[in-house]
Amino acid sequence: MATLTFWGAAGGIVTGSNHLLEVEGNRYLVDCGMFQGTKKVRELNWQGFAYDPSEIKALFLTHAHLDHVGRIPYLVRHGFSGKIFATDATRDLAKVILYDAFKLHKEAVERGREEGAEELQYTEADIEKALSLFEVVDYGKLYTFDEYIEFRLRDAGHILGSAIFEIWFKNGKTKRKIVFSGDLGQPGQRIIRDPEYIREADYVVVESTYGGRIHPDKASTVLEFIEILKHIGKYGGVGMIPVFAVERAQEILYELNLLVERNILEDPVDFYLDSPMASEVTRIFERYSKYYDEDALLLLEQGDQPFRFKNFRVITNVRQSKRLKNVKRAVILAGSGMVTGGRIGHHIINHASDPNSHIIFVGYQVPGTIGRRILDGERTIRIYGHTVHIKAKVHYLQGFSSHADQTDLMYWIRNFGRGVRDIFLVHGENDQREALAQKVYLELQKTPKMPLLGETVYLE
Ligand SMILES: [Zn+2]
């Protein structure tokens, strides 16, 4: 008998990805991410696991975003000692993400601000142990794990090293195939390659972050970005870009590199990357050029360094960061990506009341975060004990999204054809899942399932 239980990124919750696959009593996990967003959702982080982590034989890790890797040390703390299968880039990025998350966890616990946790829930030793469990695997190769499981990774085109998992499991005498999309990228992203399409599966578990939305095309997003940068150059304001340290920051730097080196901006603008984590991740990106797409490789061949350009500076310490209070005609990229912490909050305090300034969102904002509230129109916000009246212009450049939109998701799902037994929609707010479900039904006459948190389904 085989079952699948959705312990995260289900029931309309986007974060906390964690799927439990059971085959003949053997247990395997796909992802083990942090719950992010509202207080109620974050409380789910430290309630232990509904299964015994020491019984999990393997963890298949799709990519290094916090909502997919964040609870791995906590899983280790509770007895997990199986193997963690992921690409080399995912392993290296996970290391950065996990140490950073631990720092934030520790600070939150000390300030009494960690939902559902009065004391530390894991230690750095658990992170070290987790990192020692990694087994690096490549895209495109078939691996046999045990007598029940074979798997293959495909490029998910979402962030560096991100993978789709194709898993074949033996259910009695029959062999079935289940595909976990992980997070799927938007085709045409800078730097990394496009998501791969898969033609066959019995079961498909697919993300639906943008299941009901269609991104504006990349070209118009870039044009909008250029207009904002020109406005900054002309009127002397400050552009604040909350960035996720992984992928988003590098994509934006890559874009800026092109715009600056091709002299597309009229007035000179200074650029600052004020995120130690994003700087570290950028170095990992430089190390893994083997995962770049053709355009990025071509740039390298021409001798251009995609993450270095004129008037761009990496901020290395807090003193320099504080000095950014006085800059004009500048763009600051800083974390966190949803303004839940990090240095971006300070820059918003310093510059957001200037009507010539700009807050530029370039990625998805989880409900409940300060980023989402600003995006939804709140103009008086409390950050780090300060009340900020936001007069800066607020933009949402959706074309930079690292997530597939409805059209991309449908294209990916359609490739499986009609032989699929069940499609499960995860990793989406309910309106997004419903919109995608409707679209799938219209095109494939198949009603996808929208699992609740903790729901178990049988894979026959
Ligand atoms: Zn992701």
Image (cartoon, grey):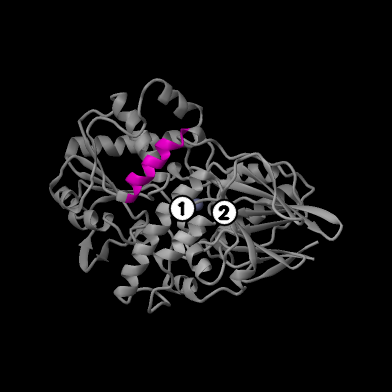
Q: Seen in the image, is 357 located left or right of residue 176? A: left
Q: Earlier in the sequence, mark 2 or mark 1?
A: 2
Q: Residues within 10 Å of mark 1 (few under 14, many from 20)?
A: many
Residue at the outermost bottom position: 118
Examine the image and state in which quarter residue 422 appears.
Answer: bottom right
Question: Dot 1 corresponds to which residue?
Answer: 94
Residue at the outermost top position: 302
Query: Could you tell me if residue 160 is visible in this image?
Result: yes
Residue drawn at x 57%, y 54% is 61
| Nearer to us in this view, 65 or 222 | 65
Q: Check residue 254 for magenta coloring.
A: no
Viewport quadrant of the N terminus: bottom right
- Disc number at residue 314? none
Query: Cβ–Cβ below 8 Å for labels 2 and 1?
Result: yes
Q: Is residue 427 above or below residue 47?
A: above
Magenta: main secondary structure:
helix
Label 2 CB, ligand 1: below 8 Å? no
Query: Could you tell me if residue 397 is visible in this image?
Result: no
Residue drawn at x 61%, y 40% is 139
Tag 1: amino acid = Ala
Residues under labels 2 and 1: Cα distance?
10 Å
Image location of residue 176, percent across then percent down: 78, 53
Question: Dot 2 corresponds to which residue?
Answer: 61
Q: Residues within 10 Å of mark 2 (few under 14, many from 20)?
A: many
Q: Seen in the image, is 3 located left or right of residue 121? A: right
Residue at the outermost right position: 173
Image location of residue 174, percent across then percent down: 85, 55
Tag 2: amino acid = Leu
| Nearer to us in this view, 200 or 357 | 200
Image location of residue 113, percent across then percent down: 33, 74
Which residues, given as a range, are shown in magenta? 277-289
